[in-house]
Image (tube, rainbow, N blue to C red):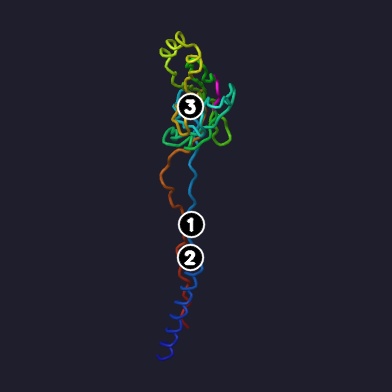
Amino acid sequence: MKNFIVGAAIAASLTSSAFAQATATFTAPVPAASPVPAPATTNAMLRVGTEVPLRLLEELTTQGKKLRVGQRFRMETSEAVIVQGVTVIPVGSPEVGEITDVRNKGMWGKSGHLGARILYVTVNGRQIRLTGAFDDKGVAGGVGAVAVSAIVFLPAGFFMTGTSAKIPVGSAVKGFVDEDVQLALQSATPPPMVVASPVPVPQPAPVAPAK
């Protein structure tokens, strides 16, 4: 009887050990889930006429008579342009404009004048055409007073001048997109599901018959 109890205890110990080994053998680690990339959509479009808020990065002035027609100047976007909830033209995107008209101040109270147009904005290395124009003129130097002075004493009216045109740094300007631009936006998707490899169910080891 004692031998039977000892044998049963040994068999139980072997069974427990075999079950633990089987459990260790069949248990697999759970791999981390990989996010599923959001598919790109191709139906988004930056349309002609979309407003692009801009600001000047340099002063434009006829003072000093250095401004020339065709001269380029720098601007940047002051607000982001958003399409379908996605920023397509970020704040600070570089923009280029061009001087189209220059008239320096002169005698007889003639004021200065300058005109400019918006050319394009650069986003991710691509130039997007823009349209828009703005101008400024100085203040005339009292044309009525000049005319009266010219009659009484000609040189007084001749040497009276107006002021120069000036647009300071940071001035706000509105531009508008001048071409349809196809966009490839990332569509909004819910958080990715956690997908793990199935874990095998541990199987108990066969129990050897008691001797």
Location of residue 23 in the rendering, given as x and y in whole percent from the top left corner: 47, 69
Magenta segment main secondary structure = strand
User: How far is mark 1 from mark 2, CA to CA?
Assistant: 16 Å
Span highlighted in magenta in the image: 97-101
Query: Which dot, 1 or 2, sits closer to the camera?
Result: 1
Q: Are marks 1 and 2 in contact (CB under 8 Å)?
A: no
Residue at the image position 47 percent from the left and 57 percent from the top = 198
Location of residue 174 in the rendering, given as x and y in whole percent from the top left corner: 44, 26
| Residue placed under numbered mark 1 in the picture | 32
| Label drawn at residue 166 | 3
Say which of 122 and 187 sits in front: 122
Upstream in sequence: badge 3 or badge 2: 2
Residue at the image position 53 percent from the left and 19 percent from the top = 103
Say which of 65 and 69 sits in front: 65
| Residue placed under numbered mark 2 in the picture | 27
Tell me if residue 99 is in the magenta stretch: yes
Identity, as a three-letter code, of the amino acid under mark 2: Thr
Say which of 189 and 125 sits in front: 125
Query: Which dot, 3 or 2, sits closer to the camera?
Result: 3
Q: Can you name the residue that lies furthest to the top here?
A: 151
Identity, as a three-letter code, of the amino acid under mark 1: Ala
Location of residue 190 in the rendering, given as x and y in whole percent from the top left corner: 41, 44
Upstream in sequence: badge 1 or badge 2: 2
Q: Are marks 1 and 3 in contact (CB under 8 Å)?
A: no
